[in-house]
Structure formats: structure tokens, C-alpha cells
Image (cartoon, coloured by chain):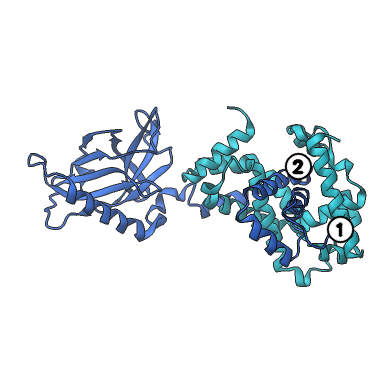
Chain colours: A blue, B cyan
């Protein structure tokens, strides 16, 4: 048996991949192997195949149900379950907010001015996880929301985006977002007062909106309206 | 699609989008198997529970890097669990040499009726390929797989020359591969 594998020979390469997947290589061998692995698709596939083969050792273990405390800790630490909406403010941090603001300002700069449209007093750009804009939400001076669809990629057929105002941890629907074009949302006066101070969030919901008036789908983004410099807020 | 493996692929994709319900489904479908695996590796209930938590937190964070063309979802999760469990062992290995690793009991293992039903869902296990392994080969491979031991560490653990252990592993791999791919 060779002390070192000759990785240029298919049969040796294959067994070396098995030893690597099993984890028996010493540090020097592993480093040598990984140098080739990084550039060889064949070797990557061999290692993947061996990982599937070695699953045999796991498959024969009798499943054991873990205690419920494990899931509770996971739900808490991923911001799931009850804490999901309350932790929104901490979710993505300030980096996302400033990126949204920079993008919002850039988009406003190139958007042609429509003299007939009401003044934009504040904006919030809804970004998906790739930081691409899905919608631009502009608040008018009197607290109505003009929503322009950019490319809402996360919303599939039979689905819609829904905008929520999150106050005291409880989401309240502000309305459904358009797939394309522009839509004007008119929140109730009591909600308008809170628009500037509350978190907004967008979730994916079935067509027609969240059935029980509470969000059910994944959150695409959350953030706040940012006042446009020099604008007057009358809500 | 009702293929359980496809459902796991969908749930991992859901996790990548930040869908907490997908994570909950993934946990319900896979946690008992990963917990059994971690118990086998760390052999301590509290530690296995901590590790299990780590596995799902990592899966949640790394789900966008899961590629169904490269690994089946259960294999991807098991690989994650194995890394987390073996990391835990390594961190405490200096004072863990006397942790009661008895190759004889390890080779016995728990292999009750529930294990048979798990195997049943898997076509490749219709033929039990572990049975083609010789006792020494299987024992050495299981020690390596579940304890994260290198050739040299294995040789020390089972008190055999390095070359002997290397050839057990090598023949074990060859036989396993032959059985899994051609059924011989």
C-alpha cells in the first residue's frame, strides 16, 4: 500500500476520496488532497459520492426524538416563532437601512418628476435578500402611500406582497402591493400617525392577502420610511 | 411532489429565503435522525442537544449554499451534524482518552426495529452493505466515522500497527463501494 496516494490515477484518487470523506487522513495528507480538491470537479464529485455511501452508517441508527427545549432554543435564536415580529428592528441592522436610503435617493434622482403627483414626503425601498429593489413606497405629505412595483421577484403566481405596520410587536395590514405599476394605499388616520415611527414589513401572502389578517408568509424586508429632506410631514 | 427527499430540498430552499415555517418542517422531519447521530458521536445527552441546536442554526444560515445537484438533503445535514459533533469531541479530546471507548461495544451498536424501518425507505439499503464488511474493517470505519479519528489515532485506539489499520480501512472502502454500486 502506498504511503501517499497518486491522485492522477483514477483508482487511487477514488479511494483517497473515500479516506477523505471518512476523515482518516492526517493533516499533511488532507492538505495535499484539499489542494487538488479545490480545483478538481471530478474529485469533488467523488467526495460527494462517498458521503452518500457513508450515510449507511447513519441510516442504521434508530432515530431518537430530542426534547422540546432544543426546538424552542432554535426558534428563539433564529428569530422565529413568537419573537419574529418583535425582533424585526434588530433583524438586519443599520447596514440595510443605510443601503436602502442610498438606493432610494439614487432612484429618486433619476425618476422623472411628475408635476401632477403629490409631493413625496418620505420613502422606503423594499429590498429582497439580494438587495435588489422590489417596490418603492413613498408617503405623501398627508400620509397616503404610493407604491411602485420595481421587480417583486419573490412573489410567485397566486401570491401577493402585503405591507404591514409593526407597532408594539403586532403587525397591522396597510394593504396589498401591486405586481406591476403603481398603487395608492390609504391607511386609516390612526395608522397614518404611526407611519413614521413604526417598522414597516413586507411579507409574501396568498392572492387576496393574509387570510386571518395576520402575516403568514416569509418576510421579504422590513424598514422604516425615511423623510425626504425639505419635505413637510402633515400626518 | 410527495418524495420526502424533495420536500427536504424545498424546505432548505425555504430556509434560504428566511421562511421560519420551512425550518420548523425541516426540524420535524430530520431532528430525530440527526439527534441519534449526534448521540452516537458525542455520547452525552446534554452535549448532543447543544450540538443539535448548532446544526440547525448553521443549516439556517448556510441553506442558501445547499446545492441539490451535489448532495441529498439528508446527507448534507448529516455532514453538518458530523462536523459539529466531531468538533465538540476534538475540543475535549485531550482529557477524553478514558471516555470508555470500547471497540467491542461500539461494534455491537443499537440496531433495533426502528433502524430497519429507516432503512426501508432507502433503496440502496435493500441490500445491507455493512454486512459485506469484515468485523475489523467495519469497526475501524465506524470509529473513524463517528469519532473523527485519523489512521494514526485509530491505530493507537485499537492497538494495531498503522499499516494494518490502513489496510482495514482501504479494503473496507473497496468492499463497501463494490456492494453499493454493483450489489456484490
**Residue A194 at least partly seen:** no
Q: Can residue A222 be seen in this snapshot? A: yes
Residue A1, numbered label: 1
Please report the residue visible at 35 percent of the width from the left and 49 percent of the height from the top. Answer: A222
Query: Which quarter of the rendering shows the N terminus of chain A?
Result: bottom right
Q: Residue at x 89, y 41 (%)?
A: B132
Q: In x, y percent, where is residue B108?
A: 89, 49
Residue, far front: A8
Question: Which of the labelled discs sits on residue A59, or is there none?
Answer: 2
- Name which residue lies at 91% across and 55% down: B104
Classify mark 2: residues with Cα within 10 Å, few (<14), some (14-19) or many (20+): many
Chain label for disc 2: A
Instruction: Please give left or right for residue A62 compared with residue A84 in the image.
Output: right
Q: Give a yes or no on whether discs 2 and 1 share a subunit.
A: yes
As displayed, is residue B108 above or below residue A24? above
Label 1 lies in what chain?
A
Helix, strand or loop for disc 2 = helix
Residue B90 sits above or below residue B40 on the image: below
Instruction: Say which label, 2 or 1, has the lower sequence index.
Output: 1
Q: Position of residue A173 (x, y in %)?
A: 31, 39
Tell me the crowding category of disc 1: few under 14, some 14 to 19, or many 20 or more residues within 10 angstroms, Cα based.
Answer: few
Amino acid at each position: 500500500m502506498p504511503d501517499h496516494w497518486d491522485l492522477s490515477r483514477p483508482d487511487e484518487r477514488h479511494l483517497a476520496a473515500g479516506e477523505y470523506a471518512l476523515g482518516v487522513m492526517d493533516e499533511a495528507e488532507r492538505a495535499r488532497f484539499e489542494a487538488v480538491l479545490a480545483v478538481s470537479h471530478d474529485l469533488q464529485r467523488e467526495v460527494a459520492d462517498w458521503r452518500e455511501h457513508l450515510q449507511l452508517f447513519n441510516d442504521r441508527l434508530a432515530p431518537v426524538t430530542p426534547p422540546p427545549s432544543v426546538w424552542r432554543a432554535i426558534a428563539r435564536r433564529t428569530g422565529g416563532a413568537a419573537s419574529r415580529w418583535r425582533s424585526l428592528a434588530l433583524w438586519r441592522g443599520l447596514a440595510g437601512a443605510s443601503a436602502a436610503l442610498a438606493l432610494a435617493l439614487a432612484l429618486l434622482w433619476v425618476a422623472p418628476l411628475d408635476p401632477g403627483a403629490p409631493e413625496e414626503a418620505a420613502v422606503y425601498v423594499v429590498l429582497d435578500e439580494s438587495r435588489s429593489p422590489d417596490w418603492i413606497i413613498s408617503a405623501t405629505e398627508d400620509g397616503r402611500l404610493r407604491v411602485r412595483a420595481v421587480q417583486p421577484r419573490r412573489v410567485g403566481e397566486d401570491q401577493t406582497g402585503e405591507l404591514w405596520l409593526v407597532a408594539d410587536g403586532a403587525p397591522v395590514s396597510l394593504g396589498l402591493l401591486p405586481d406591476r405599476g403603481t398603487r395608492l394605499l390609504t391607511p386609516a388616520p390612526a395608522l397614518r400617525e404611526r407611519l413614521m415611527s413604526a417598522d414597516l414589513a413586507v411579507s409574501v401572502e396568498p392572492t387576496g392577502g393574509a387570510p386571518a389578517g395576520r402575516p403568514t408568509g416569509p418576510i421579504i424586508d422590513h424598514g422604516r420610511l425615511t423623510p425626504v429632506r425639505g419635505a413637510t410631514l402633515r400626518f | 411532489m410527495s418524495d420526502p427527499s424533495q420536500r427536504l430540498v424545498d424546505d432548505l430552499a425555504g430556509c434560504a429565503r428566511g421562511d421560519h415555517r420551512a425550518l420548523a418542517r425541516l426540524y420535524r422531519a430530520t431532528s430525530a435522525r440527526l439527534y441519534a447521530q449526534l448521540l452516537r458521536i458525542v455520547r452525552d445527552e446534554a452535549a448532543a442537544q447543544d450540538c443539535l441546536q448548532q446544526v440547525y442554526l448553521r443549516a439556517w444560515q448556510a441553506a442558501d449554499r445547499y446545492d441539490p445537484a451535489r448532495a441529498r438533503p439528508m446527507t448534507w445535514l448529516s455532514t453538518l451534524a458530523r462536523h459539529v459533533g466531531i468538533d465538540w469531541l476534538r475540543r475535549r479530546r485531550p482529557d477524553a482518552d478514558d471516555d470508555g471507548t470500547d471497540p467491542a461495544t461500539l461494534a455491537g451498536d443499537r440496531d433495533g426495529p426502528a433502524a430497519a424501518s429507516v432503512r426501508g425507505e432507502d433503496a440502496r439499503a435493500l441490500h445491507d452493505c455493512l454486512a459485506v464488511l469484515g468485523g475489523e474493517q467495519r469497526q475501524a470505519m465506524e470509529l473513524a466515522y463517528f469519532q473523527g479519528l485519523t489512521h494514526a489515532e485509530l491505530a493507537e485506539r485499537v492497538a494495531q500497527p498503522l499499516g494494518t489499520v490502513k489496510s482495514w480501512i482501504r479494503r473496507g472502502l473497496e468492499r463497501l463501494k463494490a456492494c453499493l454500486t454493483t450489489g456484490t
